[in-house]
Amino acid sequence: MKFTEKLSAAWRNNNSLLMVGLDPDINRFPEECRQSKTAIYDFCTGIVDATAPYACGFKPQIAYFASQRAEEQLAAICEYIKKNYPHLPIVLDSKRGDIGTTAEHYAKEAFERYRADAVTVNPYMGADSIEPYLAWDDKGVIILCRTSNHGGSDLQFATLEDGTPLYLHVARLVAEKWNRTGQCGLVVGATFPEEIAKVRQVIGPDMPLLIPGIGAQGGDVQNTVVAGCNALGEGVLINSSRAILYASAGTDWREAAAQMAINTRDEINEARHSLLLAPNNA
């Protein structure tokens, strides 16, 4: 099944646009996990089990694993998700961006080593740095466009000669030239809902948007849904990581994570419902 097909099925079958980010920080783990040699695996699979019924997928951030020399645990976590929740896509958040020959190896890392369904990439080096990922025509390639950090404006708001900001130029490039497999998506942060709406207008209703920035980063769910969803109330993967992962450091950490995932999913769905009932929705 192609990434976009798997994602669409997850949106509908789980009635959720919530993507749960896996950003493991051992210093914030509950005490029962910290002492284990496989602490990261134990914690992350516990979170996966607790939140899978309420999510449309999982987004492991590779730096949190690599800094702890836990790449093998990441591979095992991805395998665990594949085995136990095969209907939920894995988006490897690595933001890779390098020349074509190097990108070929990054693509193998994402799609062979970790068996991810999609990967985040950086478009700064242009089309030939994206091409190796597109060779995997069933995999998602989610390209940075308008990121949730405020410093992103330093480059993303730079303008072309015709006045178009760089982030919208990237959106147009992806939509009109790079999305030849139909498996591309864009990263647009929840902290900038006006820019989400502009990106959606440029790319049309079908391309998925990975939207980080709600929860700990303060993005607004209602504004995000209105700006990013298509007429079906779909089209977005709204990511929450720390707010769910570290909802509790006590013995109830699994239950607390599940409840936070439920609350976030329900808040998103309430906004979706309002959007679908709006008279101008088309």
Image (cartoon, helix red, strand yellow):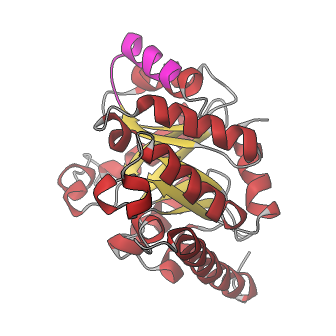
Where 198 falls versus 35 (above or below)?
below
Residue 232 left/right relative to 109: right
Magenta highlight: main SS = helix
Q: Residue pushed farthest top?
A: 101
Q: Is-magenta flag for residue 115? A: no
Which quadrant holds the C terminus? bottom right
Q: Is-magenta flag for residue 100? A: yes
| Viewer-side residue, 108 vs 220 | 108
**How many numbered discs, if any?**
0
| Residue occupying image coordinates x 37% and y 69% | 192
Where 139 falls versus 24 (above or below)?
above
* Range of magenta residues: 97-109
Residue 117 visible to an observer of this rendering: no
Which quadrant holds the N terminus? top right
Q: How far across and how far down the image is residue 257, in percent?
A: 53, 71
| Residue occupying image coordinates x 66% and y 45% | 89
Residue 83 visible to an observer of this rendering: yes
| Viewer-side residue, 194 vs 16 | 16
Where 112 falls versus 144 (above or below)?
above
Looking at the rendering, which quadrant does residue 51 occupy?
bottom right
Residue 144 left/right relative to 156: right
| Viewer-side residue, 272 vs 264 | 264
Q: How far across and how far down the image is residue 154, in percent?
A: 17, 54
Q: How far across and how far down the image is residue 53, in percent?
A: 72, 64
Residue 268 left/right relative to 216: right
Q: How far across and how far down the image is residue 19, in percent?
A: 57, 59
Residue 233 left/right relative to 202: right
| Residue occupying image coordinates x 63% and y 77% | 262
Looking at the rendering, which quadrant does residue 238 occupy?
bottom right
| Residue occupying image coordinates x 28% and y 37% | 67
